[in-house]
Amino acid sequence: MKSAIRIIAFILAILTAKAFAQTPLTPKDTPASQVLAQLVKDHNADQKAFDVKRQQAMSTLDQSNKTLSDQVVAIQKALMDDLNKDKKWKDRLQKITDMQQKLQANGQNANQAFQRDVGPLQQRVLTEQSQIDGLLPIIRKENGFPETAAFDPVSGKWSEPKK
């Protein structure tokens, strides 16, 4: 039984690999293909820079909010303990409200700083993607590539599904 399952899994793996197999295509050296190659390089570099900045912004926000979040949790626990003992909870409840407002302000400030920082980069990434999308049909036509020819923007290579 196990060997039959292994054989079926092996056959499915082969069929799947053949279904997704690609034949590499090499475009002619034309102005459009040269522009596409440069755009892909620029786009990939800008996308990486954008991702790094986004990760840095998230990390900074997480670090600045951790202390406040820990304080809110501690005060909420103490408040619940005190609520069970007596009704002197107003001051702590106000502290929690104040800290929650600070957390919200931190999030808004981090988002605004991130948008200011990456706005131009984000615009370049979008512009480059539009230009890349516009060049693909031109290069397909210049090279006689079929409509099924695919361009991988990460590697900058063309391919078409194997038949």
Image (cartoon, rainbow, N blue to C red):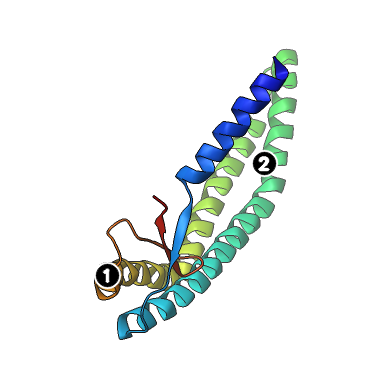
Which of the numbered marks, if any, corresponds to residue 153? none
Based on the displayed image, in which of its 4 quarters is residue 29 positioned? bottom left
Q: Residues within 10 Å of mark 2 (few under 14, many from 20)?
A: some
Q: Nearer the viewer, residue 61 or 40?
A: 40
Q: Mark 2 or 1 closer to N-term?
A: 2
Name the spot of residue 95 as percent of width and height, x first.
63, 38
Image point (72%, 40%), residue name = 70
Examine the rendered structure and indicate whether residue 21 appears above or below residue 140: above
Residue 122: image location, x then y, percent? 42, 67
37 is higher (above) or lower (below) than 152: below
Q: Looking at the image, which residue is at 64% across and 58% down? A: 60
Eyeballing the image, is 102 above or below 42?
above
> Count of labels shown?
2
Which image quarter holds the N terminus?
top right
Q: Is residue 10 visible?
A: yes
Residue 129, image quadrant: bottom left
CB atoms of marks 2 and 1 within 8 Å: no
What whole-number distance in Å separates the C-alpha atoms at marks 2 and 1? 59 Å
Of 58 and 74, nearer the camera is 58
Judging by the rendered image, the residue that carries numbered circle 2 is 69
Q: Amino acid at mark 1?
A: Gly
Q: Residue at 57% of width from left, 41% of height from top?
A: 100
- The image shows residue 63 at horizontal and vertical percentages of 69, 53
Q: Secondary structure at mark 2?
A: helix
Identify which amino acid the numbered label 2 is placed on.
Answer: Ser
| 122 or 4, nearer to the observer | 4
Residue 89 appears in the picture as rendered: no
Q: Secondary structure at mark 1?
A: loop
Q: Mark 1 highlights which residue?
A: 144
